[in-house]
Image (spheres, rainbow, N blue to C red):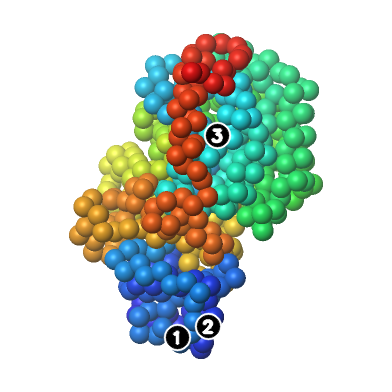
Amino acid sequence: VDSAKLQGSGPLDSPELDLLITGGDVFTLDPQFTVVRGGSVGISEGKIAGIWSRDDMPQGTACEVLDVTGSAVLPGIVNAHTHIAGCVFRGVLEDYSGSGLYDVAFPFEQRLAREDIALLARLGIAEVLRGGCTTINDIYYYPDILASVIEETGMRAILANKVFDAELPLIAAGKYERNLDAGRQRLSDNAGLIEKWNGRAGGRITCRVGAHATDTCSRSLLKEAGQLAEQSGVGLHIHVAQSSVEVDYTVNAYGRSPVHLLGDLELLGPSTVVVHCTWVDDDDITLLATSDTHYVCCPVIYPRRGYFPPLQKIVSKGIITGFGTDWIRMDPWDGMRQAVNAVRMLTRDPRAISAQDVLSRSTREAAKTLGLDKEIGSLQVGKKADVIVVNLQQSHIQPFYGAAAGLVYTVGSGDISTVVVDGVIIVREGRCLTVDLEGTLREVARRVPGYAGAMFSKGPPIPATNG
Ligand SMILES: [Zn+2]
C-alpha cells in the first residue's frame, strides 16, 4: 500500500525534533505494510514523533537532519534468537561431519573465559548492527558480560542465562548425567541477572529466564525455571525439539515429546518463546497453538544441516512467529532468503511465502513474539525510535522498484548505513560508533590459534593468548 498522505501520523504544527531522517522510501512495516515514498521520519525524545510524505512535511526544527534520498528506511530488525558470542564457531561447524552442537560446541563453549565472551560479544554486536539488528534475544554463558556490552554499544537486548543441569560434553556419547547443584547455580545466576539488569540502560535491557532445552534441563529444573520466570514477571526462552537427540531423550525418559513435556509442566503460554521446533509433529503444533505459545524460527541455520522446521504449518495454525539468526553467521537478510527458499522447496509452491512475509517476521512479528510489539518492530508514531537506513545505491541492489522483494532478495549485512536505537545514532555511514572494531579484530586474531587448538580437544584450558 502506497500512501501519499498518512492521516493522523504525527503532529503537523511546529514539531521540535531531535532527528529527522528524510528523503528515503519509508517501509513502516505497519500491519497494512504502508510505504511512504520520499518520506520523512521525525524522532523526538527517543520516540517516533511523526512520519510524513513530501507533501505534508510540517514546519519545524530538528537538531540533526539526515538526508537519505535514494535509501530505504525501516524499523530495526528484531533478532528473536541469538547466541552472539557463538560467532566463535564461524567456518568450523558448518561442514563438520558429526554433530557440531554436541561434539564440538557443547564441550568447547563451556570453557570460554569471561574475557573471551566479552571479546566475542563485541565482535558479534558489531556484526548484527551492520546487519540492521537493533534488538537481540540472547541466551548464553555470562549474560552479565553481554549486558555490559549492550549498555556500552547502545543496542537493545533481552538477555537470559544458559541454564541446564546435564553434563553437556557427555551427551555426544548418549549419556545424560545431571549435576543438579550446577543447574540450580545457573538458575540462581539468572535470577541475579534479572535483579541487576532487567529494565536497565534506559529500558534497553530486559531479561528472560533461559532454560536451555528440554533434554539439557531436568524436569525439576524446567519447573523451577518456570517458577522464577513467573515470580520475576519475565518470560521463558527455551530451545525445543531442536534435534532428534533431544526428542529421543524426552520420549525415552518421560514418554512425552519435548512440546508435550512443557505442556505437562505448565510452561507453555504467550510469555514462553520456543525456538526451533524442528522435530515437531501435528499434535505438538496443535498444543503450541492452543496454548498461545510464541515461536522463533532461525531459517539461516537449518538448510545446511539438511532439514527445516514445518514453518508454514506452524504459521497456518496462527502461532505467533518471528525470525532469529541463532549463531555463527548472524545476517538476518540471509535468513529471510533461506526461509523463502526452504518453504518454496518443501511446498513446491512459490506462493507459499513472500518477501513481505519474511520481512514482517524479522521486524513486527518478531517483536510480537517477544511481547514487545507495543514498543518496537514497526515505524509508527509513539513507538521507540529503532530505525535503520539501507543504502540502495549499490550494484547488487539497483535497479530498485520499491517493493519488499527489492530489499529481501538483495540486501545483506554491510548495506546498512545508519542504525538508530532509542533515537540515538549508533551506526553512521556504515561505521559502528560504539565498537572499536579494529581493536576487536586485532584481539580476535591474537586468540584464534588458541581457539583452534582447543576446539577439537577436550578439557581446559583455552589459552588466552598465543604469540
Ligand atoms: Zn540457539
Determine the residue positioned at 54% across, 65% down.
423
Question: Residue 249 appears at what percent x and percent y?
Answer: 60, 21
Residue, disc 2: 15
CB of mark 2 near ligand 1 (< 8 Å) = no
Corner quadrant of residue 159: top right
Determine the residue positioned at 32% across, 63% down.
71
Q: Earlier in the sequence, mark 3 or mark 1?
A: 1
Q: Nearer the viewer, residue 16 or 433?
A: 433
Q: Residues within 10 Å of mark 3 (few under 14, many from 20)?
A: many
Question: Residue 285 appears at what percent x and percent y?
Answer: 53, 41
Q: Earlier in the sequence, mark 2 or mark 1?
A: 2
Q: Nearer the viewer, residue 425 or 58?
A: 425
Q: Earlier in the sequence, mark 2 or mark 3?
A: 2
Residue, disc 1: 58
Confirm whether residue 157 shows in the render.
no
- The residue type indicated by label 3 comes to Leu
Residue, disc 3: 119
Q: Nearer the viewer, mark 3 or mark 1?
A: 3
Determine the residue positioned at 55% across, 38% down.
121
Determine the residue positioned at 71% across, 18% down.
178
Q: Quadrant of the N terminus?
A: bottom left
Rounded to the nearest angstrom, the CA distance separating label 2 from label 3 is 42 Å
SS at circle 1: loop
Question: Residue 167 appears at what percent x and percent y?
Answer: 66, 18
Q: As displayed, is residue 414 above or below residue 63?
A: above
Rounded to the nearest angstrom, the CA distance separating label 3 from label 1 is 45 Å
